[in-house]
Image (spheres, rainbow, N blue to C red):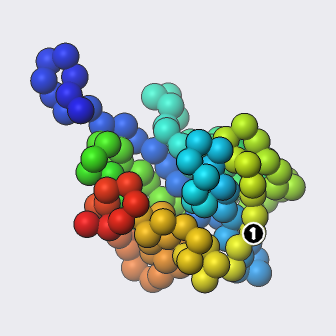
Amino acid sequence: MKSDNGLPLHSVSVSGIVRRADGRILAIKRADDGRWVPPGGVLELNETPFEGVVREVLEETGVRVEPERLTGVYKNMNRGVVSLAILCTPIEGIPHTTEEAVSVAWLLPAEAIETMPEARAVRVTDALRDGGPFVRVHDGTSLL
């Protein structure tokens, strides 16, 4: 996508990889496409990535989180969306459905990886690995 002056347009999003003390991962089933993904969304112009992930996870799940560290950078090559995955710890709140999430669940890492599209599941696997942050590209569903 290009702007009026011909320059490419990008947006920046955040994905919260929320890991509970028992190792389970917070996941939502999106209302718009029915896919299981980590909670997240587009950053506002006036917020940092850590502020954005706190806001997005709370809005989508009712869970307040403490961001720990950036674990990956992911670009959707078809849509020009760059997403920053941030490992988070839940600090309060009971997960519940919202306008954006028709279901919210604490999944075992293997369940999250199996249930999510590859482009989202890799954010979980990367967040649980040593090293990083990892940089990957995808088409919205699969890694490229």
Label 1 belongs to which residue? 106
Residue visible at 75% across and 69% down in the picture:
106
x, y percentage for residue 140?
38, 55
Residue at the front extreme? 34
In the figure, residue 98 lies in which quadrant? Answer: top right
For this view, does 96 lie left or right of residue 132?
right
x, y percentage for residue 1?
24, 32
Please state which of residues 61 and 84 is positioned toward the viewer in this rendering: 61
For this view, does 135 lie left or right of residue 111?
left
For this view, does 101 lie left or right of residue 76?
right
Is residue 73 visible from the viewing direction of this image? no
Please state which of residues 104 and 15 is positioned toward the viewer in this rendering: 104
Residue visible at 50% across and 49% down in the picture:
14
Residue visible at 54% across and 67% down in the picture:
116
Residue at the left extreme? 6
In the figure, residue 95 lies in which quadrant? Answer: bottom right
Residue at the top extreme? 4
Please name the amino acid that badge 1 sits on. Answer: Trp
- Secondary element type, mark 1: strand
Please state which of residues 18 and 68 is positioned toward the viewer in this rendering: 18
Total labels drawn:
1
27 over 14 or under it: above or below: below
Is residue 1 visible from the viewing direction of this image? yes
Residue at the right extreme? 94
x, y percentage for residue 44?
50, 31
